[in-house]
Amino acid sequence: MLLVGLVTRPAVLCCLDGIEKMTNRYLGDSFLLPALDPDNKDWFTSGQLHVQFCNHCDAARYPAEDVCFQCQGSDLEFRAISGEGVIESVVEVQHPVHPLLADRVPYNVAVISLNGAPGCNAIGNIVNSDEVDVSIGQKVRAIFEEATDPESGEQLLIPNWKAI
Amino acid sequence: MNGDAVVVGIGESEYYKRGGSEETEFQLAMKAISRAADDAGLELSEIDGLVSYMDNRNDPLRLSSAMGMKELRWAMTPWAGGGNNSAAAIQCADAAVSGGYANYVVAFRALAQGQFSRFGTHFSGMTNAAGPHAWTHTYGLISPAQECALQTKRFMHDHGITQQALCDISMACYANAQRNPRAVRYGSPLTREKYHESRWIVEPFHLYDCCPENDGAAAVIITTPERAKDLKGEAVPILATAQGIGPNIGIDSFQGRWFPGMFYQGVGEAIWQRAGVRATDVDVLQMYENFTGPVMMSLCELGYCEPGELQDFVADGALEGPDARLPFNTSGGNIGEAYIHGFEMINEAVRQVRGDSSCQVDKVDLSFAVGGPGYAPGSAVLFGRD
């Protein structure tokens, strides 16, 4: 299935530090930004995929939780994992439920299983769906959308996905 | 459970399109409750318990006062979630009367989307993606339709299910609504062509895979079999109820080992174990369809068929009409009758046992109603003859 977007998708820039970044966001630069909190700060700012792991039993958990679901321990840390994953499901959204999406439909949303974090599936967009056949089972690699946190002025690097 | 509590009256307001009610939500609630009391032959003031669910706005202080209650002895809502709790509300009322904490408990749901817009402004007013929404809203995953679509897409992919199965489920709701003058979609039949030509909301959901938003209220009165003997209303036993959820946190979670799913296996096992019957023994099913896709997964998880059999299980009108292979959403359901967050289906399940449905199934001994799938905790209730 080829998911075809009606809007021009952003240019991709490759940076010196080896992290693939996008200067524009897939859903538009004015679209909702994540409100940073201790559980999501690493995910949205580090330029790597950081997932919560339990230091006692090594269970991975996404999104983060205060207590390990497997051993009930609370010695938890965020660890960087590989930037690759697999599409577990992907849909095309045609009806915009937010005014900022009115001129962005259709857009895709995918469930991505994260390599290196067993059992963890993240939500994201496949940013190059105009160019590549996007379907369940497709391998993807993280790409980071640059934005600025309106509260702190801190740079955000929002993980998203490129089909490879 | 096991007939220690019975439904002795049902009532509902008129059902309207979203924003169509000129009455306030509180007035709609009172209308449904009053009609249920009339149906039971009970004075409103004798009612001493109130149960609702899903951030109910019609709180017990206002209601007990408006109803002229002598004493309010039981007021509660099941924890969290949304329409998943429609049957859990029955369980709470059952627990109250069978445990002796209250004599006559109303379980109800009321909503006026014109007065309190649930969607639309709720989403469009958002200015950032905070808390648990940061992980999803940031990526444009915002609505329940989108969440359920991701689950449904993978389920269809894994089991070779086509769009036709979704169409079959929607068609059954619309066909049954044509028999029901209360239904908002009464007089608006759906054809396969119209279904497939309708716009996509989020693939694989067409417009007709999604239930509408409506205004209205529905209520039931629950008491003990002994008290029911003194009332004119027909007593319909509550044979079993269950609430719960499988591992993890439901359809807005997509975690690997449990994706895709509606997490309803445990609710099904509890119901069948408590009642001593199986899914296939049930005469008529009301199953919450916020969207058609979750119905497919719920049918499988509750024991009706295997995922590989689903396509055929719902095909060829298998769910349509009183003589269907599995009579399903006989009043039209959320899609066809009205989206009273699944409570209109509780009334219909009771009606099927009483024998006064507009799509009445012959010889109903077991009438099953299933609350909204996927969110925690899910719930279901089995009514029937002792």
Image: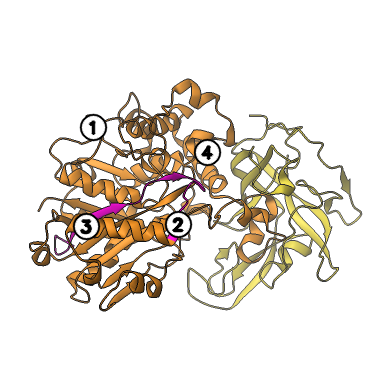
Chain colours: A yellow, B orange
- Whichever of labels 3 and 1 marks the residue nearer the N terminus, that label is 3
Which mark is drawn over residue B375? Answer: 2
Q: Magenta segment: does it hold B62?
A: no
Q: Magenta segment: does it hold B13?
A: yes
**Cβ atoms under marks 1 and 2 closer than 8 Å:** no
The crowd level at tag 4 (other Cα within 10 Å; few <14, some 14-19, many 20+) is: many
Q: Amino acid at mark 1?
A: Pro
Q: Amino acid at mark 2?
A: Tyr
Q: Amino acid at mark 4?
A: Lys
Q: Is residue B191 above or below residue B380?
A: above
- Whichever of labels 1 and 2 marks the residue nearer the N terminus, that label is 1
Magenta range: B1-25
Taking the view exactly as shown, the residue that stands out farthest to the top is B193
Q: Which is in the foreground here, disc 1 or disc 2?
A: 1
Q: Which is in the foreground here, disc 4 or disc 1?
A: 1
Residue placed at 17% from the left, 49% from the top? B277
Most common secondary structure along the magenta stretch: loop
- The answer to whether residue B85 shows anywhere in this view is no
